[in-house]
Image: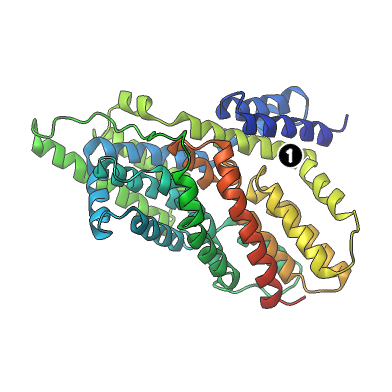
Amino acid sequence: MDPAYIALIILGAVVVLYITELLPLPLTSVGGCVAMVIFGVATFGEAFSGFSNSTVFLVAGMMVVGTALFETGAAEDIGKKIATLAHSNEKRILLVIMITAGVLSAFLNNSTTTAMFITVIMGIAAASRGKIHSQRLIMPLAFACNAGGMLTLVGSTPTVIVQGVLTQAGYEPLGFFEFSLIGLPVFIAVIIYMSTIGYKALHKLADLKDTPVIPETEDPHSDNGKRTSKKKTAVAIMLLCIILFITEPFPPGLTAMIGAWLCLVTGCLKEKDTYRNFDWTTVLVLAGSLGIAQGLEISGAGQLIAEQVLELGVSSNPYVIFGIFIALGMILTQIMSNTATTAMMAPIALFMAQGLGVSPYPFMLGLCTLTAAGFATPVATPPNTMALVAGYTFKDYLKIGGILNIVVFIVTLVFVPLIWPF
């Protein structure tokens, strides 16, 4: 059997297991990688390449830095200050975090921004003593970071990919802030939705519990001087990571690992505490999903899906084809990495536009908007996967993020052709 069809069968099984949760999410993700190897879709190195991905090390490293901030009490102090500024109002805190994190994601890696703010949110929840719940803040944070990445050229990988395809084909490059013409309406839509309908839905998730485990800290009265010193050191390490993320002398994954190493070497965190409090679920789901996406890409399964849908020939109207095309990109990015989906579909978008005799810009902008804005599954984007630390289930993403994806699809369908006509 063609490897592409085998990959699609494996993908179908993985999606069913994700939704039903008959197996824990990490087992499903890793099992998908194992199946890709056993059935000859990919080599062992290709299927498990996600475990060496820089994003995985970014997530793992920032988890360690975040744990150190908790261990020393620094995260709780930061949370108290933000809560005080927002008058301890959960809704105001939600808006402050979404806007701040979203804007930062326009210039920083959105995975990096998510990792940093999850730590802050955990501190706010800990400082509130039950008045503020992290589950009502972390998913909105992830979604805001996804949308914020669409505000500039460097905010997300999909924007960079479509820019490269356009310029390589001889078209004029898009401006650095030109993406914000569609990115800003999407970002505003995400904030409005998550602070209203999404916020109410998060309140109704009856099966959610406060999952963050605050590491046992030393008695604050036993050695205040030592505790204060560790707290300052942990904050300094976090600030160093932020500076390195902005200046980019190293890849983000390496910066995060430097931060984690410093936390252990300086004694801000004990080795045993690191192993005990580490969120292995997020790392395994992220790495496994990247491996599955790699199998779909190299087998041609993803491209097969795209070509089959587009060859249906339902219409010759550019607007209709545009709608079908971006809808397909939105669906594929829920099960594949947005980088792989965009890289696969961008050349097809260019070819379709040339065949129709229309401008490629609306197809390209619509594609990168909806592949960057993956909300309906925890594996759609790294920020979504990181949000699993709050205890969400696959169905929670479908219920809350699925509706948001439809909202963003409508916004894209309306605004993109108006801004970049066919």
Is 370 positioned to the left or the right of 267 in the image? right
* Image quarter hosting the C terminus: bottom right
Is residue 105 shown above or below 215?
Answer: below
Q: Quadrant of residue 304?
A: top right
Q: Is residue 250 something that shows in the picture?
A: no
Q: Where's residue 178, x and y in %?
A: 58, 73
Q: Is residue 188 left or right of residue 83?
A: right
Picture quadrant of residue 354: bottom right
Task: Give the quadrant of residue 51.
Answer: top right
Q: Which residue is mark 1?
A: 296
Q: Residues within 10 Å of mark 1 (few under 14, many from 20)?
A: many
Which color mode does the image show? rainbow
Drawn side of residue 171 relative to residue 176, left or right: right
Q: Residue at the location (86% across, 48% down)?
A: 308
Tally of numbered tags: 1
The image position of residue 122, as x and y in percent, is 33, 43
Can residue 125 be seen from the camera position used here? yes
Q: Position of residue 410 (x, y in %)?
A: 66, 63
Q: Residue at x 50, y 34 (%)?
A: 283
**Which residue type carries mark 1?**
Leu
Determine the secondary structure under disc 1: helix
Residue at left offset 38%, top offset 55%: 94
Q: Quadrant of the N terminus?
A: top right
Give coordinates of residue 223: x percent, y percent: 9, 33
What's the residue at 34%, 56% (across, down)? 93
Describe residue 23's horizontal placement relative to residue 359 as left or right: left
